[in-house]
Amino acid sequence: MKRSGSKLRTLNDSKNQQLTWRQGITFILSAPSGTGKTTLIKGLRAVYPEIRLSISFTTRARRPGEIDGHDYHFVKPAKFAAMKAKGEFAEWAKVHDFFYGTPRRPLDQCIRLGRDMILDIDVQGARKIKRKYPQAVSRLRNRWNYSGPSSRLSEPKPPESKSGG
């Protein structure tokens, strides 16, 4: 069974049991540096370890404590340019004299296989992903408030009523 407009499909296995398949969900987490994105991602992955994290490519140098292939894929500018020319990035941007890019293949694979993925990317990258992957989820602000680096995420407060009339 396939419902129109839906990303759910029902398949039959060898024992004629129905299995439901869905597309993977792409979650875009985009906020300024120091706002707790890494902490939020670690917390989500502790509760939902099956969520994949996209590992971006970058031309900047590795910082102390960073691990190639875990924090980023660190590559030379020539390699990045070659990957860009081959269309291997779902999005890419130049930020502070360095290039950053989200690899297309793992993202497309997760969507196709029904696996969810988090992208930790900048605002320009988020816009590009939303244009190419309109089904990507990028708005958490309607559910949560954030008041700066020293605050915690909290449930939104109801609006104050204004007197007068």
Image (cartoon, rainbow, N blue to C red):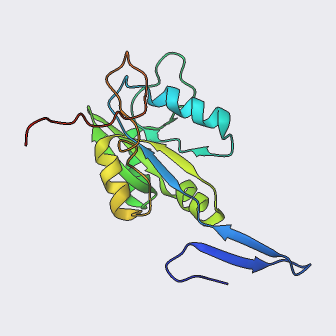
Residue 94 in view in this figure: yes
Q: Which residue lies furthest to the right in this view?
A: 15
Q: Position of residue 116 (x, y in %)?
A: 59, 53
Q: Residue at x 21, y 36 (%)?
A: 161
Q: Which residue is drawn at 52% across and 83% down?
A: 4
Instruction: Count the marks.
Output: 0
Q: Which residue is drawn at 26% across and 37% down?
A: 159
Up-down relation of residue 6 to residue 159 (above or below): below
Give 86 or 19, whichever is nearer the viewer. Answer: 19
105 left or right, relative to 47: left
Q: Where is residue 138 in the image (x, y as percent from the top left)?
A: 39, 50
Residue 93, by quadrant, is top left
31 left or right, relative to 5: left
Where is the C terminus found, in terms of image quarters?
Answer: top left
Up-down relation of residue 163 to residue 62 (above or below): below
Q: Residue furthest front?
A: 165
Q: Position of residue 131 (x, y in %)?
A: 33, 62
Residue 68 in view in this figure: no
Give 22 or 142, whichever is nearer the viewer. Answer: 142
Q: Where is residue 1 in the image (x, y as percent from the top left)?
A: 67, 84
78 left or right, relative to 69: left
110 left or right, relative to 96: right
Give 154 or 31, whichever is nearer the viewer. Answer: 154
Q: Residue at x 62, y 83 (%)?
A: 2
Q: Which residue lies furthest to the left in this view?
A: 165
